[in-house]
Amino acid sequence: MQFKEYTTIQASSAQSSVTITLNRPEALNALSTQVVEDLEDLLGVLEAAFRHDAGGEARGVVIIGSGEKAFAAGADIREMTAMTPDQAWEYSTRMQSLTLRLESLPVPVIAAVNGFALGGGCELALACDFIYATESASFGQPEVSLGLVPGFGGSVRLQQRVGPSQARELLFTGRRIRADQAHRLGLVNAVFTDREALLAAARKTIAEIAGHSPAAVAAVKATVGRVEGRSTADGLAIEADSFRQAFTTADMREGTRAFLTKEKPAFSGN
């Protein structure tokens, strides 16, 4: 997969994963309006590629920050100080739309957090399917210390990850937590020694997922998203419908055939 050059991000594809690097190290990769614009454009490319099976071998996305200090230190405060309330609303809703598009990609998205993931940076990570982190990573929603509230999904997704009471404590205090505590809370899936090990692990996980049916992985991701927050009965009904739909796919026929004949399946993604 080929990508154009962007001002604030870098995109590359190797084997089974696409790597998106937030590239404003001088500003700790803060999420300026230009970052949002660049990510919107790139997501359009990825959505089209995965929709038309033009992603080549790519079967997942890894998001990481450039440098050693930050994944993303949050929204761009210098820009925000000059915003009117209406401009702030537009900034918030654009970023929220971007996070929803990330969640809707039919492939897994892993946030590889190296350094700070604060405010909008934490919210971007929360929009990914799961989070890996380095030992030096830290997380937080410090908006209250600036007279603000989360604007990119933190008040919604943080409590989905760690539960309402833990989320309220973090949101009300603006407290920053290290990777080991984030791991204990369930915010982070795994912790690694350094950036190199972090990126290697994220890509290895994408490669593992790539060995399975693309159609099934996409359906599981969609199903998990649809059942979240539903009652048990409603969730089970959605799951049963997804299970039924799987029986219409070529991948299901190929996977079950290969299992019975003890062969390696050749999934088409259909």
Image (cartoon, rainbow, N blue to C red):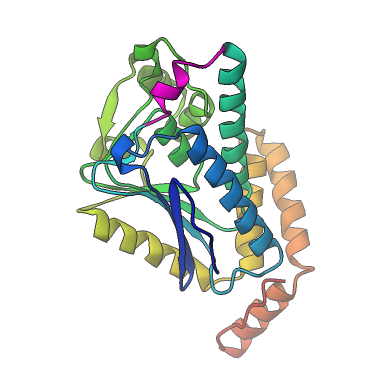
Q: What is the total number of numbered labels drawn onto the structure image?
A: 0
Give the percent coordinates (x, y) of residue 41.
Answer: 60, 49
Quadrant for residue 101, please give it: top right
The residue drawn where x is 51% and y is 61% is 60
- The residue lying toward the viewer, choosing from 218 and 80, is 80
- Residue 224 at what x, y percent from top left? 61, 47
Point out the image quarter for the C terminus.
Answer: bottom right
The relative height of residue 92 versus residue 243 in the rendered view (above or below) is: above
Name the chief secondary structure element in magenta: loop
| Front residue (pair 264, 171) | 171
Where 20 falls versus 94 (above or below)?
A: below
Q: Start and end of the magenta stretch?
A: 74-84
Residue 219 lies left or right of residue 208; in this view the side is: right
Res 90 visible: yes
Name the spot of residue 27 as percent of width and height, x first. Answer: 32, 35
Work out whether residue 92 or residue 138 is closer to the camera in this orientation and state it. Answer: 92
**Against 224, is 108 above or below?**
below
Q: Position of residue 125 (x, y in %)?
A: 44, 41
Kindly identify the residue that appears in the image at 63 percent across and 48 percent down.
104
Whether 125 is among the magenta residues is no
